[in-house]
Image (cartoon, rainbow, N blue to C red):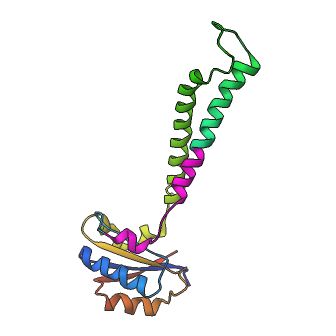
Amino acid sequence: MKKLFGLVAEFATPDAVRNAAEDLRRSGFRAFEAYTPYPVEGLDRIIHPGPKPLLPLLMFTAAVLGAFWGYWIQFWDEALNYPINVGGRPYNSWPAFMVGTFEFMLLVTIAAGFIGMLAASGLPRLYHPIFEAGAFERASRDRFVICIEATDPRFDAASVRALFERLGAERIEEVPA
């Protein structure tokens, strides 16, 4: 027997997919995703409710560490490793170090944000089982698709199929893992 990734339902309108997502959330399903040809207002808040503080926290931490590291590199080079007295200025000339510190902080923050975004979205993964669903082909053109994953604790193929039929899905299909 083939292992099941989930069950996919195809809807014709954005309102139908939004209503289906609300009903699934109220029914207690957590592991489901929607695929639409254009953004549907409010659908992201239904599927992924609550704040997402991880990426901003990662970028803030990277900014603080990047600023510290950028300043430390300049301080170590100019004041500790190779001190040269230029025009009577102190070795630790913090005003001169600020431009480099700021630029390095931006570099580290942007790199951390980019890597964090890739990790959060799962983009390094080249294959996803949803690509095997026939309904998924039209999700980028004119249909709205919801997939409930078999990993959801409330998942039962027969009851999910009945729920999708009650919600008015045009087509329902199983997606192998």
Of residues 81 and 94, the one drawn nearer to the viewer in this rendering: 94
Residue depicted at x 54% and y 81% = 2
Of residues 48 and 145, the one drawn nearer to the viewer in this rendering: 48
135 drawn magenta: no
User: Bounds of the magenta span?
Assistant: 42-62
Spot occupied by residue 37 in the image (x, y as percentages of width and height):
29, 64
Residue depicted at x 56% and y 33% = 104
Which quadrant of the rendered structure holds the N terminus? Answer: bottom right
Residue depicted at x 33% and y 90% = 165
Task: Considering the whole magenta stretch, tell me its main secondary structure.
Answer: helix
Q: Is residue 110 above or below residue 86?
A: below
Q: Quadrant of residue 170?
A: bottom left
Q: Seen in the image, is 71 located left or right of residue 26? A: right
Residue depicted at x 31% and y 88% = 167
Residue that protrudes farthest toward the right in the picture: 80
Q: Quadrant of residue 7?
A: bottom left
Q: Is residue 113 visible?
A: yes
Spot occupied by residue 53 in the image (x, y as percentages of width and height):
52, 60
Q: Seen in the image, is 107 located left or right of residue 21? A: right
Spot occupied by residue 60 in the image (x, y as percentages of width and height):
55, 48
Q: Seen in the image, is 78 located left or right of residue 44? A: right
Q: Is residue 92 above or below residue 87?
A: below
Q: Quadrant of residue 45?
A: bottom left
Q: Is residue 124 visible?
A: no
Spot occupied by residue 122 in the image (x, y as percentages of width and height):
51, 59
Q: Is residue 19 above or below residue 89?
A: below
Count of numbered badges drawn on the protein: 0
